[in-house]
Image (spheres, rainbow, N blue to C red):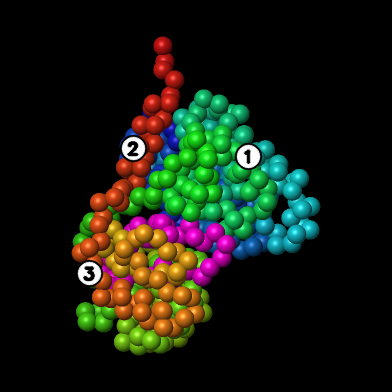
Amino acid sequence: MKRVVLVTGHYWNSKRKAGFHWLAEAFWHQGWEVIFVTAALSWLSVIRRDYRLAYPVLQEANTLQPMRQNFWSYVWFTPWHPANLRSHLLNHLSRGLFNLYGQLPLGSVEPLFKETDLFIFESTPALLLFDRCKQLNPQAQFIYRVSDDLRLLRNHSVVLDTEERVAPKFDLVSVPSQHIYRLFAGLPNLELELHGIRKDLFTQDYVNPYPVSDIPNVVFVGNAHFDYEFLEQASQLFLNWQFHIIGPMNNLPQRNNIFAYQELPFESTVAYIKHADIALQTLAYSPGAECFTDSLKIIQYSYCQLPIVAPAYLASSRTNVFYYKPGDANSIYQALIAAQMYDRSQISTENIYSWDDLVSRWIKRIDKNSPEII
């Protein structure tokens, strides 16, 4: 049985399901042993009240946790990790210490790393582990799946420098958006591979969670960068529409047509997406946010043939996205009306693939590049 190690910032049993969760599932379904490593978690995370501390990460720290047969979760908890200390002086003084992050003890997974066939790194500070893993297992294949622009996440300069240095050393740099593709342009190991989706979940029938009525239901699903001003204006412009906000968004406008759900298990959000009339990708701008043109939510919304409303800086060739100028009530009105009038049957889902499709593509590449055993 082949083994894959996925190094990510996500915790396996989190309510938030990101691409790395689905990649892990896909490898497991294709017969691989999976070790899901949660990294960039330390006492600095405790000080910052990291959302992952709501889960038993401290109790599980540095101990392999069996999730099911041939599937393991491992929380790599360290004294510190490279984090933006929000001070130019502190960030400068911490460079030497943070550069040592990849040399911290790995614990019980180190022997398993030596016998791993494939490492998949996400765009997190755990990139500093690349050299260590390469040293432990030079025969393994290495994929860098760049889920996010590290600049958008405001990572410490040590992490940015490490990414620039090690990206050319990966066997494959797989990016999910045109924006991130341009950041790595020129690398011979670069591939544009959009997010997949759990088609098995999205093709199921779900009970409509919305009250039966002719009122348009507008849904947002996410956990960060929310454009509060958009909701304030849109909910006033369309008092007879209902706006459903799924995610850890606090201090939402208090209005009868706004419904807040906080975080829900992923499977529970599917029904809200499938039965919605319009989807929102209403994100406030920060440098690097252009990568959200091809976010996982955009893919999921499009697979459900939803018209999408997004800020103008996320302009793309997608015909089912309608744009507004942030802060401009007239453009918000026009975008929502255009989305409501759009013929959803025009939205093609042919080029949207599953996570299993993406993993199968990687496995074929690995098998092709693996040296023959004579």
Instruction: Please state which amino acid type lies under the numbered disc 3.
Output: Asp
Element type at mark 2: helix
Instruction: Please state which amino acid type lies under the numbered disc 1.
Output: Arg
Of badges 2 and 1, nearer the viewer stands: 1
Circle count: 3
**Residue 266 as seen in the image, left or right of residue 74:** left
Of badges 1 and 3, nearer the viewer stands: 3
Q: Which residues are magenta?
A: 272-301
Q: Residues within 10 Å of mark 2 (few under 14, many from 20)?
A: some
Element type at mark 3: loop
Q: Residues within 10 Å of mark 1 (few under 14, many from 20)?
A: few
Q: Measure the alpha-carbon separation of dots 1 and 3.
A: 47 Å
Q: Position of residue 177 (x, y in %)?
A: 44, 52
The reply to whether residue 18 is visible in this rendering is: yes
For image coordinates 70% across by 43% down, the residue present is 99
Instruction: Please state which amino acid type lies under the numbered disc 2.
Output: Ser
Farthest top residue in view: 374
Q: Measure the alpha-carbon separation of dots 2 and 1.
A: 28 Å
For image coordinates 48% across by 31% down, the residue present is 141
Q: Is residue 286 magenta?
A: yes
The tag earlier along the polypeptide, 1 or 3, is: 1
Q: Which residue is mark 1?
A: 165
**Residue 60 as seen in the image, left or right of residue 314:** right
Q: Is residue 372 above or below residue 71?
A: above
Q: Quadrant of the C terminus?
A: top left
Q: Is residue 54 magenta?
A: no
Q: Which residue is mark 3?
A: 343
**Is 261 in front, or is 325?**
325
Q: Which residue is mark 2?
A: 360
